[in-house]
Image (cartoon, rainbow, N blue to C red):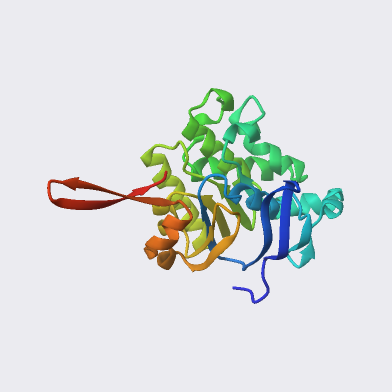
């Protein structure tokens, strides 16, 4: 693992409207090869933070660096710079429909490598590799827009993996997936992390966080990072999880006996 951070945010703030900050004064370092989970309730700012890692939104205040270079709107306007950045950082949106736009799955997966200027033989090989990796060769000639939610998610992941990114970023990756598809995706992400890929996910699914990540960044509903450390320790901290609305506690009586239960959101 490299000593220098892959991503470095220092005192970063972001908002669409000054009176409604998405997050304020956030500082984060993420090193190459880490598996990191952003944990927080819906609306806490997780998705926006992921988009900043991906170079899709930019700090209003503070500084964001990736791969040792400052990332800004001006920097991303340089076609060569942005092309290299999007090759190194792959993003899978929560809603797969927003990144599927061709009429054939094979063409969808080939699109990114073609944009990189790879030759036909290399593109064909990459498409075949990810079709096999995700076990979706049977979908190659299908229309992405006629697939199930789980199939669309796998195609979206395949289209990103075909770029061979160093960093894979996924927003609520298991939302809407059946248990078998969830398990397959999690196993793939674990394998990719084991061979050195940096994995960053956002979720409010505590089981997913426990399985996939070693480090958790817990974000409050006030858009603050209130914890940065071991995922296991975060998930064992009931008061923390209640405070950020990831679990809830309720009590009821059976006769003279009062029972307390925990409810996990999502």
Q: Quadrant of the C terminus?
A: top left
In this rendering, position of residue 185 left or right of residue 79: left
Look at the picture and state if 141 lies above or below 41: above
In this rendering, position of residue 129 left or right of residue 66: left
Residue extending farthest to the left is 255
Q: Give residue 121's quadrant in the image.
A: top right
Instruction: Work out whether residue 49 or residue 224 is closer to the camera in this orientation and state it.
Output: 224
Residue extending farthest to the front is 256
Q: What percent of the width, then of the height, locates residue 265?
A: 41, 45
Q: Give residue 113's quadrant in the image.
A: top right
Is residue 56 in view?
A: no
Instruction: Work out whether residue 50 or residue 62 is closer to the camera in this orientation and state it.
Output: 62
The residue depicted at 50 percent of the width and 35 percent of the height is 137
Q: Quadrant of the N terminus?
A: bottom right
In this rendering, position of residue 190 left or right of residue 10: left
The residue depicted at 78 percent of the width and 54 percent of the height is 60
Instruction: Work out whether residue 42 or residue 77 is closer to the camera in this orientation and state it.
Output: 42
Q: What percent of the width, then of the height, locates residue 202?
A: 54, 51
Instruction: Work out whether residue 133 or residue 30 is closer to the camera in this orientation and state it.
Output: 30
Residue extending farthest to the bottom is 3
The residue depicted at 41 percent of the width and 58 percent of the height is 210
Look at the picture and state if 113 lies above or below 68: above
Q: What percent of the width, then of the height, locates residue 181?
A: 42, 40
The residue depicted at 63 percent of the width and 38 percent of the height is 109
């Amino acid at each position: 693992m490299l000593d220098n951070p892959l991503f470095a945010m220092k005192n970063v703030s972001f908002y669409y409207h000054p009176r409604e900050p998405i997050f304020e004064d956030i500082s984060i370092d993420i090193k190459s090869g880490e598996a990191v989970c952003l944990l927080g309730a819906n609306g806490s700012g997780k998705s926006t933070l992921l988009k900043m890692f991906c170079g899709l939104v930019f700090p209003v205040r503070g500084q964001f660096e990736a791969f040792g270079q400052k990332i800004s709107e001006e920097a991303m306007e340089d076609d060569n710079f942005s092309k290299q950045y999007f090759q190194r950082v792959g993003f899978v949106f929560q809603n797969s429909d927003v990144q599927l736009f061709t009429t054939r799955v094979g063409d969808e997966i080939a699109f990114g490598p073609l944009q990189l200027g790879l030759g036909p033989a290399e593109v064909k090989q990459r498409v075949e590799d990810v079709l096999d990796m995700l076990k979706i060769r049977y979908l190659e000639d299908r229309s992405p827009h006629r697939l199930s939610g789980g199939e669309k998610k796998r195609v979206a992941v395949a289209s990103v993996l075909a770029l061979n990114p160093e960093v894979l970023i996924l927003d609520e990756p298991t939302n809407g997936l059946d248990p078998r598809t969830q398990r397959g995706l999690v196993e793939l992400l674990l394998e990719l992390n084991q061979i050195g890929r940096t994995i960053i996910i956002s979720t409010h699914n505590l089981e997913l966080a426990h399985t996939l990540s070693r480090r958790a960044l817990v974000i409050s509903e006030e858009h603050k990072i209130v914890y940065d450390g071991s995922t296991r320790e975060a998930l064992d901290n009931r008061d923390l999880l209640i405070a950020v609305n990831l679990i809830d506690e309720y009590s009821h009586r059976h006769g003279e006996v009062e029972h307390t239960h925990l409810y996990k959101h999502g």
